[in-house]
Amino acid sequence: MTEDLLSCKAGLEKRHGVVYKFRVMKAASILTVDDDPHHVRLTQIQLERLGVLNQLRVVPNGVQALDYLAGRGAYADRAKHPFPGLVFLDLSLPEIDGFEVLKMIRGQLTLKELPVVMISASNDPTNRRKALRLGANGYYAKTPYRHKFRAMLEEINAKVLAENHPQAMIQFAKPEDLEAKAGRW
């Protein structure tokens, strides 16, 4: 695990006359592997509008995804390209498809425990079964609808990350912070 995943801040907050001590983990980055710029942009917009605090990193193919995860080549500087806490992996990719990328990730000791969620335009049950058999932590169909996208993120938190990967949880801004931003949209 990298320092980026473990850094946190502590503080005190007073609510209803009671002082609470809290510790907030810094939101781990999410690596999205998708070659469709329209899907990438839609994901960026939805994450922003939902107030997701995790930084989104994007690579367009499987080769670059593996380089990013290994910190090789253009991705060697971890200050600019932090190791992700979560990977969203598309199925249909140029050069190496999502299944092959997943096999390679699961075949590397240092990446074996990294949460990888397949997010694909295909809702084919055969693809879902294959992805889960190969070690994906989840398989979801892409959606342009914000309420369904948020439900998907909450399900990923609850079913994939909460118990075994809490450092990678998808973090949302407080509702009052979103309300302040709402006037800009």
Image (spheres, grey):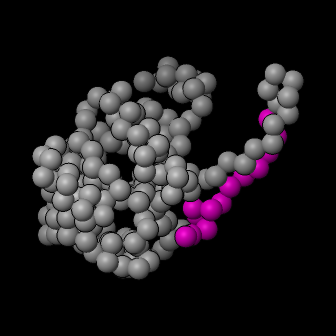
Q: Depth check: 49 or 115 in front?
A: 115
Q: Say whether residue 53 is left or right of residue 46.
A: right
The answer to if 4 sits in the magenta stretch is yes
Q: Position of residue 134 (x, y in %)?
A: 25, 65
- Magenta segment boundaries in residue numbering: 1-13
**Left or right position of 136 against 185:** left
Query: Residue at 24% of width from left, 41% of height from top?
Result: 142
Image coordinates for residue 114, horizontal then vertical, percent:
42, 65
**The N terminus sits in image quarter:** bottom right
Q: Is residue 5 visible?
A: yes
Among the 4 quarters of the image, the one containing residue 148: top left
Percent coordinates x, y for residue 147 in the rendering? 36, 27
Is residue 3 positioned above or below 76 on the image? above
Residue drawn at x 53%, y 38% is 172
Q: Is residue 34 visible?
A: no
Q: Residue at x 45, y 33 (%)?
A: 50
